Amino acid sequence: METKPQWFKVRYNQEAVEKVTQLMDDLELNTVCNEASCPNMGECYSSGTATFMILGRICTRSCRFCDVTHGKPDAVNEKEPQQLAQAVKKMGLEYVVITSVDRDDLPDYGAGHFAKVIEEVRKYNPHTMIEVLTPDFQGDQLAIDKVIAAKPDVFNHNMESVRRISPKIRHRATYDCSLRVLEYVKQQDPSILTKTGIMLGLGETAEEISELMDDIRAVDVDFLTIGQYSQPSPKHYPLHEFVPVETFAEYQRTGMTKKFKYVASSPLVRSSYRARAAVESAHNNKGEK
């Protein structure tokens, strides 16, 4: 694996990490920050924020870029919606991101559990904005409807990469299915902001990135995040390159010319990194406070 450039290296606030990790352990919760080895964990934990990962720690898929454990999942924790709502309240969060592992073993792929979590968070934290970062639910519209009905403020589902590379790195998920999920959400409830994210450094070209942007704008996606792929281990999909910071800036400018409401593009950006800023930007652009 290629040596990380200096600008891609981060330091953790260990005290903040331990404090939030202990709270998660006490409430039997998981964060994608820990499970996916996110480079922004120290910064987010220091500010008292986290992206909660529901439906357990074990994913039913084995995508070649992902560091989350895959295999046979445990039973769903039915107390998780209430436990997560308690954590949001204890942390005083004004914006929360909720994601999950893939649960292809469940009849609705975990969509109903997503809805329950949203409802419980709203019940105990009525002023907290909620973003969900979901799997594709195998494109099942009845499953997606359950999440839409719970009315998250933002519905995020990642494209991950360009059309050519997508089948090389994803397990079961497809480029077109992901597009259909994002399109369906916006069609069913235009008030829900939609969002997606991709990684650079997998061998994609500038032309392919532009085509991807056009594809997701065609289904009215509002927000786009672009970050650097970091190969978790030698067994994962090989890193092609560390993309220069200047290239990320160019993609950010390109995205804004294509009329996204917000584009976050830099090496350390991840799907939920500073997620609230995107919503605030969209509201400010509409003249809202």
Image (spheres, rainbow, N blue to C red):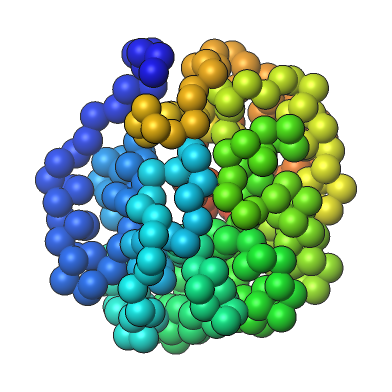
Q: Residue at x 43, y 29 (%)?
A: 230
Res. 277 in view: no
Q: Quadrant of the C terminus?
A: bottom right
Res 148 quadrant in image: bottom right
x then y, percent, for residue 50:
35, 56
Relative to 171, does residue 110 appear above or below in the rendering? below
Residue 30 location in percent, x, y?
30, 63
Is 191 located above or below residue 275 in the figure?
A: below
Q: Residue at x 29, y 55 (%)?
A: 48
Residue at point 53% right, 32% down? 227
Q: Position of residue 270 (x, y in %)?
A: 49, 41
Residue 10 picture location, percent across and down: 30, 27
Residue that appears at 66% across and 39% down:
166
User: Is residue 215 rendered to the left or right of residue 19?
Assistant: right
Q: Is residue 200 left or right of residue 242?
A: right
Q: How many marks?
A: 0
Question: Which residue occupies the foreground of this view, 194 or 112?
Answer: 112
Q: Is residue 114 left or right of residue 167?
A: left
**Which quadrant would the N terminus be assigned to in this image?**
top left
Q: Give 237 or 278, whichever is nearer the viewer.
A: 237
State which quadrant residue 234 falls in: top left
Tell me if residue 134 can be seen: yes
* In-image side of 81 versus 270 (left or right): left
